[in-house]
Each structure stands twice: as C-alpha cells, then as structure tokens.
Image (cartoon, rainbow, N blue to C red):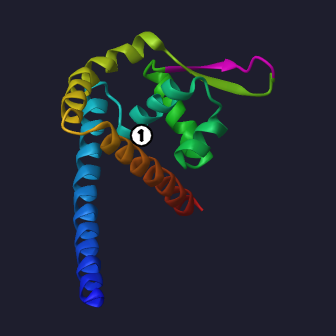
Amino acid sequence: MAKAEEKRDEAARSETLRQLMEVGRVHSGVTVMFHSAVAAKQGLNATEEKTLDLLQRHGPLTAKDLAELTGLAPASVTGLLDRLETKGFVHRAKHPTDKRRVLVELDRDKLDELAVFFEDWAGDIVEACEEFSADELRTVIRFLSVMSERQRAAVARLAD
C-alpha cells in the first residue's frame, strides 16, 4: 500500500509541476507584454524600461554594474544608455570617489511619467493578495526569489 501511495504522490507532484510550468509560461508572456506596453507609452523598449527599474531600485550605477545586473554585453549597455540619455531618462555623472568611472543617474522627473502606468497595476496586486494568507505570500516570495536567482544564472550562461 505504501508503494501505491508513493506512486500517487509522484504522479500528483508531476502534474503539479506541469501545471506550474504552464502557468509560469503564461505569466512570463503576460509580464513581457505588460512591460512592453508600458515602455511603448514612453517611447521605450522593454529592456530600456527594466533598466530604469534597476536604476530606481539600486540607485546610480556604472555601465559595468548594469552589464552585470542585466546580463547584457558591455557594448549593448553602452548603446542602451546612449538611447536612454537621448530620451532624457538618464544622465551620466562623474563618480564621486573615482574620477575614471562614470555613474548613470535617473532623471526623477522623467521617471515619474512612468509611475502613472504602474498605479492601477499596484492596486490590482494588493487586491489579488487579499486572497492569500501571510504564510502563503511568504511561500510565493520565497519561490519567486529562488526562481529569480536561477533565471539570473540562466541569463549569465546565455551571455557567455
């Protein structure tokens, strides 16, 4: 009887993982489309919009820092920053302690133009989270954190 129960558990886990992979694919696609739509409203592409998000979360960064965080090649980051600077979203400034380095800083006023697109979505997130207990949300946080690290590693492998 233990063997039969073990097989049912394996089958249930296998089916759950299949469903998770499917839902993950759907979620990934919808997320890319959302960020592409937000970016397009400001004449950006999704990579540019997510780079602004990195700068907002981490503060001023060097191009090298951005290359490491995004997994993009340094030459791609240079082009990306040139485009963002031309569009008025960032500017380059001298590093305060190392004059050989340059920091990329956000134009906060220009970034505020993007915030309006996220306000409704933030409300939707809060509303959706009402369906889950704090323990369930902590599990989701743990899962997403692990998956983010794994995906960063996958990006690094692709960049090599």
Name the amino acid type tagged 1.
Thr
On-image quarter of the C terminus: bottom right
Extreme residue in the top direction = 109
On-image quarter of the N terminus: bottom left
Depth check: 41 or 4 in front? Answer: 4
Label 1 environment density (alpha carbons within 10 Å; few <14, some 14–19, many ≥20):
some
Residue ID at (51%, 21%): 90
Name above or below for residue 33 compared with residue 55. Answer: below
Residue 82 counted in the magenta span: no
When asked about the image quadrant of residue 22, the answer is bottom left
Depth check: 57 or 94 in front? Answer: 57
Name above or below for residue 141 compared with residue 102. Answer: below
Residue topped by disc 1: 47
Residue ID at (38%, 42%): 138
When asked about the image quadrant of residue 47, the answer is top left
Please, what is the dominant secondary structure of the magenta stretch? Answer: strand
Side of 113 relative to 84 (left or right): left
